[in-house]
Image (cartoon, helix red, strand yellow):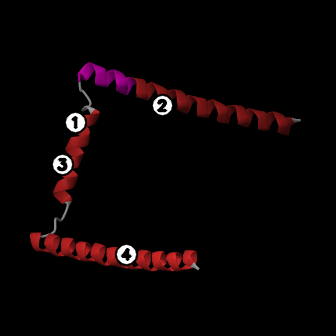
């Protein structure tokens, strides 16, 4: 019986400690909010913050040289043209096969 009482008192003390910590955290948050209101410190607008962050990130980008941009553009255009020729060839071949199959 004494063990059960001891166990309950331990649980109660743990719960009380947890509640005290939670209350302290809430009080600290409320104090911080009140301090911010008193100091008049404004948080930056979401849009303004976004563009400030964007500007700092753009500065970190390593931009390619103009020669690389032109070269990569040329490679993409050649690849697109090659793909177009392959699709055209398949389309023409399948159309011819379909025409042969429908005439027979």
Q: Secondary structure at mark 4?
A: helix
Quarter location, residue 15 = top right
Query: Per the image, is 32 magenta?
Result: yes
> How far apart in space, not on screen, are marks 4 and 2 (Cα)?
69 Å
Which of the numbered marks, if any, corresponds to residue 48?
1
Q: Residue 35's x, y, as percent?
A: 31, 23
Q: Earlier in the sequence, mark 3 or mark 2?
A: 2
User: In the rendered structure, which segment of residues is drawn in magenta?
Assistant: 31-40
**Residue that carries the numbered disc 3 in the rendered image:** 55
**Residue that carries the numbered disc 4 in the rendered image:** 88
Q: Residue at x 11, y 74 (%)?
A: 67
- From the viewer's perspective, is 102 left or right of 35? right
- Prevailing SS of the magenta stretch: helix
Q: Earlier in the sequence, mark 4 or mark 2?
A: 2
Residue 25 versus residue 68 in the image, above or below: above
Q: Secondary structure at mark 3?
A: helix
- From the viewer's perspective, is 50 left or right of 102? left
- Circle 4 packing at 10 Å, graded few (<14), some (14-19), many (20+), is few
> How far apart in space, not on screen, are marks 3 and 4 (Cα)?
45 Å
- From the viewer's perspective, is 37 left or right of 65? right
- From the viewer's perspective, is 62 left or right of 86? left
Quarter location, residue 69 = bottom left
Front-most of residues 68 and 51: 68
Q: Earlier in the sequence, mark 1 or mark 4?
A: 1
């Amino acid at each position: 019986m004494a063990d059960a009482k001891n166990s309950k008192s331990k649980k109660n003390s743990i719960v009380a400690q947890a509640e005290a910590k939670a209350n302290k955290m809430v009080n600290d948050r409320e104090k911080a909010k009140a301090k911010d209101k008193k100091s008049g410190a404004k948080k930056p607008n979401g849009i303004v913050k976004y563009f400030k962050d964007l500007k700092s990130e753009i500065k970190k980008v390593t931009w390619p040289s103009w020669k690389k941009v032109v070269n990569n553009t040329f490679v993409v255009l050649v690849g697109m043209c090659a793909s177009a020729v392959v699709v055209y060839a398949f389309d023409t071949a399948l159309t011819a096969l379909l025409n042969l199959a429908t005439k027979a």
